[in-house]
Image (spheres, helix red, strand yellow):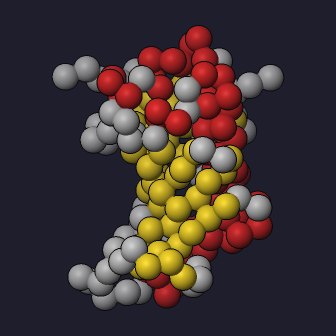
Amino acid sequence: MPDLLWDDVKGLFDPDLMGALPDVSVEDASVEDWQAVFDLVRLTGWTWEYSVGGVAGPLPSAMEVLSRPAGAETVDLRVWPVPGVLVIFRPMSADEIDFDVDLRELQGQAGVDTLCGFLAAIGRRLGKPVVMTAEGDYGNPVLGFAPAAGRVVLLGEPRLS
């Protein structure tokens, strides 16, 4: 049984309502949590690419990535949990794990299932909530992985400006 049904959540997957790149995050994170995400990416068989300033290279430890000096080149960890669906992590702070998904790649029940599976994999690995908000609407989560429930659940409706 899917965590969420497309007919119940299709408005939350509408790029015009939510923004094409909603904000997904894990708060109260640590270097160890980032390392757990890096390890998960390596172990799952997902396709991934790590780059510094747009130049691809091997994925270092989370400690190395997060201890880079201020003003250093931008770091991206691009992950494809399934072909055609890109998730971009931008490790900037140990305190929060944040990443982008493109709602245009997550349409229909297959898209909902892909997102729910990815959020659940991260949340289970960390034992922490993973929440999604409309693009730029921090603090108003609409869905996310709830550790107590062991699945992705609805958390609210996006605020319309």
Above or below for 95 versus 131: below
Residue in the image at 32% along x and 24% along y = 16
Relative to residue 4, is residue 159 drawn left or right?
A: left
* Quarter placement of the N terminus: top right
Relative to residue 7, is residue 11 drawn left or right?
A: left
Relative to residue 2, is residue 78 drawn left or right?
A: left
The image quadrant of residue 94 is: bottom left
User: In this orientation, does residue 41 appear?
Assistant: yes
Q: Where's residue 97, x and y in %?
A: 47, 60
Above or below for 36 versus 159: below
Residue in the image at 58% along x and 58% along y = 79
The image quadrant of residue 69 is: bottom left
Residue placed furthest toward the top = 7
Q: Nearer the viewer, residue 158 or 56?
A: 56
Q: Where's residue 77, x and y in %?
A: 51, 67
Residue in the image at 30% along x and 84% along y = 72
Above or below for 94 versus 28: below
User: In this orientation, does residue 36 appear?
Assistant: no
Residue placed furthest toward the right = 1
Q: Where's residue 57, x and y in %?
A: 54, 82
* Quarter placement of the C terminus: top left
Q: Where's residue 107, x and y in %?
A: 55, 26
Total count of labels: 0
